[in-house]
Amino acid sequence: MKISKKNLPFIGLSSLVLLTSSFATAAEMSSMDHSGMDMSGDMSDMDQSGMDMSGMDHSGMDHGSMDMSGMQGGQPPADARSPDYSNGVPYGQYGKPMMMGSMPLWGVSVDDLGYQFDEDQINFEATGWYGTDSNRIRLRTEGSAHTKDDREIDSLSSLAYWKPLSIFWNGEAGVAYDTENDNAAIMAGIVGTAPYFIETDARAYLYTDGQLRLDLGAEYEWRLDQHWVVIPEVGLTAFSKDDHDNGITKGFNEMETDVRLTYETFNRQLAPYVGVSYETALGKARGQRRQENESVDSSSLTAGVKFWF
């Protein structure tokens, strides 16, 4: 790139002229005679009668009687705010608002309503509740209904008080009734989420005849995508003493496993499923069932639906 240098002499001459003018101005300012400027005049000669505050009498001002309670840090008046913080403004047709955690709600959840083809029976498990996030009343029932022969219904139902114990665990306590044994019981249990998001429940039932029953269950939701979910589930039942009239032996009696493939609809409140279930007797219960010519192990295809509202 070629740069023209024809104007350089002119630029240098202009800079020299400006520099000379600056020196001349500085010399002129330094030669000015400031002796003629009289700055020693007494400021007291100025007419300050309009600003004379020496005659004001401040003794009449009583600072101790001044009310400073309205300032920050003081006590507000008794009627500064209404007790419900509405300040006299009505809430309108919907009434006073409430925190969601304090509002009583209700819900129904049917975790299982399906048909076992080989056993020819309908299984069910449902829970209904009413209350808040910290206190609820829960009604729960589970069991099976045979669709042929005697068509009997075996169910275990409970009415319990529910309360959170920690972030992941909730406690239950109440009463229950078992139609299979035709006996009432006192129930206590704990329900929650174990590590790795395993839904866990443990419930103990003390019957009026002194029998103690323990139900243990675990369930996991393996989500394949937004709608398809595989749910494996396992349950164990144990008793504290023998009861041959009802086919019960001391210790662990039975184990039930179930694997279901569910499809959650768009609102996820309705999920039909297909799956397979397997039941087996444990411990001394196996020998007792053989003596009574009952099956020790059984498996069946299942189909049904789960929903909540």
Image (cartoon, helix red, strand yellow):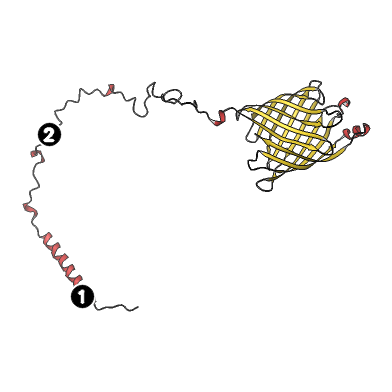
Disc 2 packing (10 Å; few <14; some 14–19; many ≥20):
few
How many numbered marks have been drawn onto this rendered protein structure?
Answer: 2
Tell me what residue is drawn at x 22 percent, y 24 percent.
61
* Label 2: which secondary element: helix
In terms of image quadrants, where is residue 215? top right
Q: Earlier in the sequence, mark 1 or mark 2?
A: 1
Mark toward the viewer: 1 or 2: 1
Residue 188 rendering spot, x and y as whole percentages:
72, 27
> Residue 302 placed where, x, y %?
79, 40
Residue nearest the viewer, comparing 95 with 12: 95
Q: Nearer the viewer, residue 213 or 260?
A: 260
Residue occupying the far left of the picture:
36
Q: In which quadrant will I find the N terminus?
A: bottom left
Q: Quadrant of residue 168?
A: top right
Q: Residue furthest front?
A: 148
Which residue type does callout 1 highlight?
Phe
Q: Secondary structure at mark 1?
A: helix
Task: Name the quarter where the C terminus is drawn.
Answer: top right
Whole-Å distance between the Cαs marked 1 and 2? 63 Å
Residue 34 image position (x, y, % from top left): 9, 54
How many C-alpha atoms fall within 10 Å of the one at disc 1: few (<14), some, or many (≥20)?
Answer: few
User: Going by the image, does 22 lie left or right of 294?
Assistant: left
Please tell me which residue is depicted at 88% across the width and 25% down the height of the picture: 245
Give residue 50's mark. 2
Judging by the rendered image, the residue that carries numbered circle 1 is 10
Q: Is residue 225 above or below residue 282?
A: below
Residue 157: percent from left, percent from top: 74, 26
